Amino acid sequence: MTAYWKANQRRLAPWLFLAPGLIMFAVYVVIPIFQSMAISFYDWDGLGEAEWIGTANYVELFDDDAFYTSLVNNVLWLGLFLLAVPAGLMIAIFLNQTVWGMRAYKSLFFFPFVISQVVVGLMFAWFYAPNFGLLYQLIEWTTGAQVAILADERYVTYGIIVAGLWPQIAYVMILYLTGLNNVAPDQIEAARLDGAKGWRMLWYVIIPQLRPATFIAVVVTVIGALRSFDLVSIMTNGGPYGSSRVLSFYMYEQALSEYGYRMGYGAAIAVVLFAIMMVFISGFIWKMWRDETER
Amino acid sequence: MFPRPIEQASPAAQLAYKIALPAALILWLLPLLGVAMTSVRPASDLAQGNYFGWPSALAFDNYISVFRDSNIAQYMLNSFKVTIPTVIGCLILSTMTGFALAIYKFRSNLLIFFLFVAGNFVPFQILMVPVRDLTLNLGLYNTSAGLALFHIAFQTGFCTLFMRNFIKALPFELIEAARVEGVTEVRIFWYIVLPLMRPAIAALSVLVFTFIWNDFFWATVLTTSAETQPVTAGLSSLNGQWIAAWHLVSAGSIIAAMPPVLMFFAMQKHFIAGLTLGAVK
């Protein structure tokens, strides 16, 4: 036994070190993905007997208006959430100075990211609140219109996305601040001697050097946009009339809320969301894989 | 440095910058400042429509009444009961997985590594039904342990990515030298690599602490009662009870946000080092 171990420890050791983490990850993350895929072909209330219904859940999704509302909102989230990337870059450039107290400014700008989305949601709900909300009063004062953002089907999703952008911009900003810190100074000096400045300098010299930061910023922003659940749940609970639902929220609503326990239908929604995210995840993994094998 | 240091600009531009800086900060933190101010506003102010003016008095009793009249202390305790074991658990698992993936060459190495990375990005909803079912079958539904176990497993994905890249950047000669001396693999892990991982462990503890403290989705899926719900889920249900009592909602929000905020300011350097890993090559 010990002789075998002594002879083979370099071959066995990685598996011993991997085993606990890999088993936990398999049980709680990898296997459930496939279980969910299987459940999506059943009609199941989570307690009784599950009944095989083939693709009926997916067929139902095709005709479900609420599903399309959620899907459209997800696209909106994704598109608008990506604004966090340029916005974060702008703030990072604005803050990349060394005046007195800059460190404190940077951490206070980053502050929203540390706060729970539940608290962020409550803050913005208060900010938007009809009659006394700061934004409501500001709109009334400038345009005379009375707009209750979270109760208006036209604006509600935008209102929630803005709340989501607040911490996300902070996150992207900190990524770019770190990136800017590492831009090669000699290249900037060389470009300056060639007469580059302002936008041209930013576009042709700085942004290409910020590529690693941009990659991570895009990854976390895309994932964050598609994962949006907390803010919708806290700020509107999907309302008014389900108009601010996103897929992640609609799935939860179908599978676990007071509307009933339709695990199979919920799983089908989750599979669709998973498929959408897989497109992006495969892209990220493909790029990381290339970087790893090139080295 | 980009942009050009402001010290080289004209005095007028420098002055403009020094004014713009605090102005931008106040604008940026406006929702937060509003809530902080509301949390010390007496209820009578709100009743009289004094929402934005100076509070007529500083009502710190809002905080006292939140603690006295709601379960928030219990919710906070529940959050610690989930967060601390999760931090410890996934640090233990991921130092080992990270070590295995960074040090050893074997055929499925990259495949397993990317399994962890990809798993870390999946939507929670695809895990929800089976994980809830598993937790029910283990008899851990509506317990801190059930919630912590899931978090440990899920966060291991992110932590493995982090640890593996960190160990990969260490000088490999150290390990080779130890092997030549005949040091066993377990001892290499314990006596050579682990002591060098202190910065990574510090960074991940603050990050995971914040992520788990702020988790809302799993808290609502896996816990249901005031005895077990973490503060995010608790705050959400208190918000339902305190309709229009914004001074209480605000005070409760600030209490719930406190631990990660204090953690962040105390360990800022580690926090940011962890978050920006990979942002530079």
Image: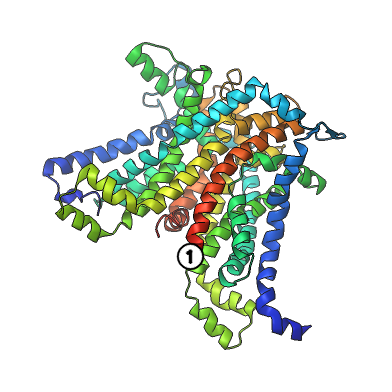
Dot 1: what SS?
A: helix
Left or right: A89 in relation to B15: right
How crowded is the residue under tag 1: few (<14 C-alpha within 10 Å), some, or many (20+)? Answer: some
* Residue, disc 1: B199
Q: Quadrant of residue B10?
A: top left
Q: Can you tell which quarter of the image residue A109 is in?
A: top left
Q: Quadrant for the C terminus of chain B, please.
A: bottom left
Which x, y percent locates residue A174? 39, 48
Q: Residue furthest bottom?
A: B181
Q: Chain of mark 1?
A: B
| Residue A157 in view here | yes
Image height check: is A267 above or below B273?
above
Q: Position of residue B189 (x, y in %)?
A: 60, 74
Q: Amino acid at mark 1?
A: Pro
The front one of A198 and B3 is A198
Residue A110, picture quadrant: top left
| Residue in the foreground of this view, choosing between A31 and B229 | A31
From the viewer's perspective, is residue B263 above or below residue A155? below
Q: Between residues A110 and B164, which one lies in front from this camera angle? A: B164
Residue A112 image position (x, y, % from top left): 44, 41
Image quarter where the N terminus of chain B lies is: bottom left
Most extreme residue toward the right is: A49
Residue A86 horizontal/vertical position (percent):
36, 40
Q: Is residue A131 left or right of residue A198?
A: right
**Foreground pick, B60 / A95:** A95
Q: Is residue B264 left or right of residue A235?
A: left
Q: Residue at x 55, y 26 (%)?
A: A72
**Above or below: residue A49 compared with residue A242:** below
Q: In this rendering, does residue A116 appear at all?
A: no
